[in-house]
Amino acid sequence: MVLRGLTIEVPPGTVVCLVGPNGAGKSTVLKVASGLLKPRSGRIVVDGQDVTGQGPQQMLASGLAHVLQGHSVFKEMTVAENVLLGAYTLRDKAVIAERVAFVQELFPIVGERWKQLAGLLSGGQQKQVEFARSLMVDPKVVLLDEPSMGLDPKSTATVFEQVVRMRDAGTAVLLVEQNARRALETADLGCVLDLGRVHISGPAPELLADPQLSELYLGGRPSEPSTSGP
């Protein structure tokens, strides 16, 4: 058993961040939500519809898109080819064109590098291609697993800016992130997981300001929010 009696709600138009020590079950939550793992009990509900037990393809159709850890672009393919892979379930060319225009506006680098090989982009730019691909089916919730992994500070700041852009464009985001303090500075709501349970949850600024929580889970005393992010 990894998750024990855990309940997490991701309201529309919010970024909810899961933080906690290694082994707390953060990535497992995302895998269960996206259908990669089936829960032994409990329910997964999307927009009022019970989707428990569905596989990844059905979960995607239900409105859940999962961006996995690490880089998942195909470097030998163009940015366009990578992004359009996210539309493989769509058949209406007009809808696909609308979604392409949407993601190019949301992530300008995607439009600027549309015909270039994805492998020529920086790590942060490749992550934006992954974000764009996940939004091609207009999901209700995007699940992001460690989006800043392996990125330099400048690229990390850009990635968090794009997370906020997704939220502001109307997509809910469930975020798992190793940089707990930076993630909570970006999020609207936070959940601290420990041993498969929600230890504490609430507005992200309140969690950041909690001295005990900061000492136990965030690597030190509370600090002023980063000025480099959104």
Image (cartoon, helix red, strand yellow):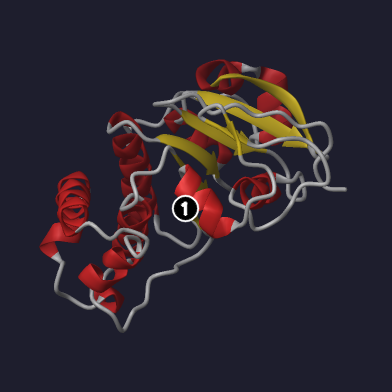
Which residue is rendered at x = 68% and y = 31% of the image? 192
In the picture as drawn, the residue positioned furthest to the front comes out as 91
Q: Residue furthest left?
A: 112
> Disc 1 marks which amino acid?
Pro
Find residue 162 and report its image quarter.
top left
Place residue 76 in its image quadrant: bottom left
Please name whichever residue, 58 or 143, is drawn nearer the observer in this view of the structure: 58
Q: Quadrant of the C terminus?
A: top left
Q: Residue at x 37, y 77 (%)?
A: 74
Q: Where is residue 201 shown, x and y percent of the image?
A: 65, 21
Crowdedness of circle 1 by 10 Å Cα count: few (<14), some, many (20+)? many
Residue at the bottom extreme?
Answer: 76
Secondary structure beneath dot 1 equals: loop
Percent across and percent down for residue 193 are 72, 35
Query: Badge 1 is on which residue?
Result: 147
Residue 79 appears in the picture as rendered:
yes
Is 192 left or right of 88, judged from the image as shown? Answer: right
At x 37%, y 61%, the residue is 89
Q: Residue furthest right?
A: 1
**Residue at figure coordinates x 52%, y 38% from the top left:** 174
Residue 7 lies, in percent from the top left, at 71, 28
Relative image position of residue 80 (x, y in whole percent): 21, 69
